[in-house]
Image (tube, rainbow, N blue to C red):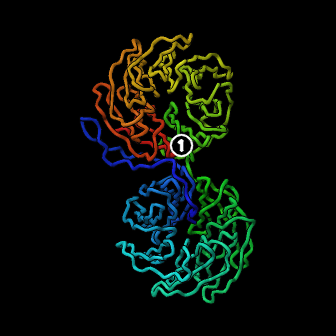
Amino acid sequence: MKNIKSFAIKLFTLLIPLLFITGLSHGEFISPTPLWARGGHEYPVNTVAFSPDGKTIASAGNDNLIKLWDAVTGNLKATLVGHSDYVLSVTFSPDSKTIASSSCDESIKLWDNQTGKLLLTLNDKVRSIAFSPNGKMLASTEDKYLKIWDIANGKLLKTLTNPSNQYLFSTAFSPDGKVIVAGSIYNLVILWNVNTGMHLATLKGHKDSVTSLGFSPNGKIIASGSWDNSIKLWDITSGNLLATLTDRPGRVNSLAFSPDGRIIVSGNDNKSLSLWETETGKQLSSLNGHSDAIHSVAFSPDGKVVISGSNDYSVKRWDIVTGKLIDTITGHSGMVFSVAFSPNGKIIASGSGDNSVLLWDAATGTLFARLTGHSRQVYSVAFSPDGKTIASGSADQSIKLWDSVTGKYLTTFTGSPGRVTTVAFSPDGKTIASVSGKSILFWNMATGELLDTITDPSYVVSEIAFSPDGKTIASGSQDKSIKLWKTDTRELLTHMTGHSEFPISVAFSPDGKTIVSGSTDKSIKLWDAATGNLLSTFTGHTGAVVSVAFSPDGKTIISAGRDDKLIRSWDIATGKQLAVFTGFIGDINSVAFSPDGKMVVAGGSDCSVIAWPVE
């Protein structure tokens, strides 16, 4: 089902990173190909579809994106970027080779399912689309018109006359490709002969918009779903109404027949999916698990699984035999604020605006644990030096500790004066430092006791970092300085000035002799940790530098630019830019090196966690 409600002005404009990125004066760079990318939708999901070969699930929604998922593992395979407004409908060609999508940007786009390449764009105001059974034609509803296109060349073949003069919402081809049907904004189901364009019949009975349509596999029955809370079954030959299926109050947004035609599934505004027996009209079960209206449903080709897309941003898979939820095939559903590697490099933790911490296998990108318990955004995650514990800091003013192997919740530290924006372990693992507003707080790792607090009158705005020996801690402040504090006495040792705006990210070199900082002034600066002297400045980002990190050998720096959506790597000795890593559609919030220096991982506002190899 397509989201056909009026849409609010979007909060973000999603920009496509250019393939070639101009670097500094010393050359141009191309992003290394990501090892893997994981992420869910950031906005409501309007449409889902199974590829006919059963290998791929497509989902799309109000984030303007189409996401392709592996139907077996649920892993994200690709994100198709090109629409500039909400994606209302997505469907596969019968041979699974082509994907068609329609959008509020008044276009239909055709994509290669294998490569993700954009093949063709048709400019039209479209609400719904459907492939013909032979895969050669695409039907679209546009205002009061039903159009049929040749997908080989994008040519408009015919426009079918609508006798009702009503706006059309939904459409479907009969299995033999001879009949096409459309549902109208008020209450009609209209049929045409595909070859001649002749109007065949208008079926009346619904009391509200006909939002979804489907033919039974044998072509004898049409099912129509409506905002009048009902599904109606019609005999295609006679046009007679065979049955009306009604559930508890809830507008029907989407429906689909099982491949054998015995079951109909519907997705409803009441947050549930309903399963119906086609022959008797009996309701078999109701599947509950979404937290908002369901806009789209589809059967797997073998009929064993149903997928659903919802206003709650998620895509879910359901076992039809048991009625149980198989899984939710999203990563984070909110922006990723922080990423961190475990000391052995095998696990990546990510903290998100969806209030969760996710644990990923660093090699494969497989999600293996979801840590829930925070009641607000998770701004920061960190591993203990022994890798056994994860700390997470949240806007709910708490720090939570988790077992990194099992994901089991361990304990909560409370008493922070505000949202916890950063957490860091001391090198000996005995202390956790955190940032809340103007305060840096020190906690006893074993007991959760608040040991001491440093108050910075100018407001702490950055990540904090312990020196490798644990004797000092660095922080960035709103007074545009980097401050170095003595860990045991909390004494201010050094005040480093040189940034023209807030330094919001800091890190120590592995040998502890150097500090790197990134700032909203778009620059990266290198400092002598002993003297506080400025050593060098790197420029190239077009916006705030929100995260910086040293490679394990101390020879390279990586930096993340929020506005330019790029990660850049730099040679410390020469100041030369080495590479540019691209792949994010939204802003980047956090970046980290793996312990062996062979991988870079980052998280951002488009809900993605992406890993790249380091050449």
Q: Residue at x 56, y 57 (%)?
A: 45
Q: Nearer the viewer, residue 436 or 262?
A: 436
Q: Position of residue 394 (x, y in %)?
A: 61, 33
- Note whether 184 is above or below 5 in the view shown: below
Picture coordinates of residue 495 (x, y %)?
A: 44, 14
Residue 282 x %, y %: 74, 74
Up the image or down, 468 lies above or below 49; here it is above
Q: Which residue lies at the image location 47% right of the left edge and 85% below the top edge?
A: 197
Task: Report the side of 304 relative to 93 (left or right).
Answer: right
Quadrant position of the C terminus in the picture = top left
Residue 7, image x and y in percent?
Answer: 55, 57
Amino acid identity at mark 1 = Met
Q: How many marks?
A: 1
Q: Split into 4 quadrants, where in the image is the N terminus?
A: bottom right
Front one among 83 and 599: 83
Specify whether residue 182 is in view: yes
Task: Say above or below: 83 vs 608.
Answer: below
Residue at position x 40%, y 24% from top? 516
Residue projecting furthest to the front = 165
Who is closer to the viewer here, 243 or 287? Answer: 243
Residue at 41 percent of width and 12 percent of height? 530
| Res 389 visible | no
Report the side of 221 relative to 284 (left or right).
left
Front residue (pair 290, 198): 198
- 10 Å neighbourhood of mark 1: few (<14), some, or many (≥20)? many
User: Which residue carries the number 1 mark?
Assistant: 335
Question: At numbered mark 1, what does the secondary structure look like: helix, strand or loop?
Answer: loop
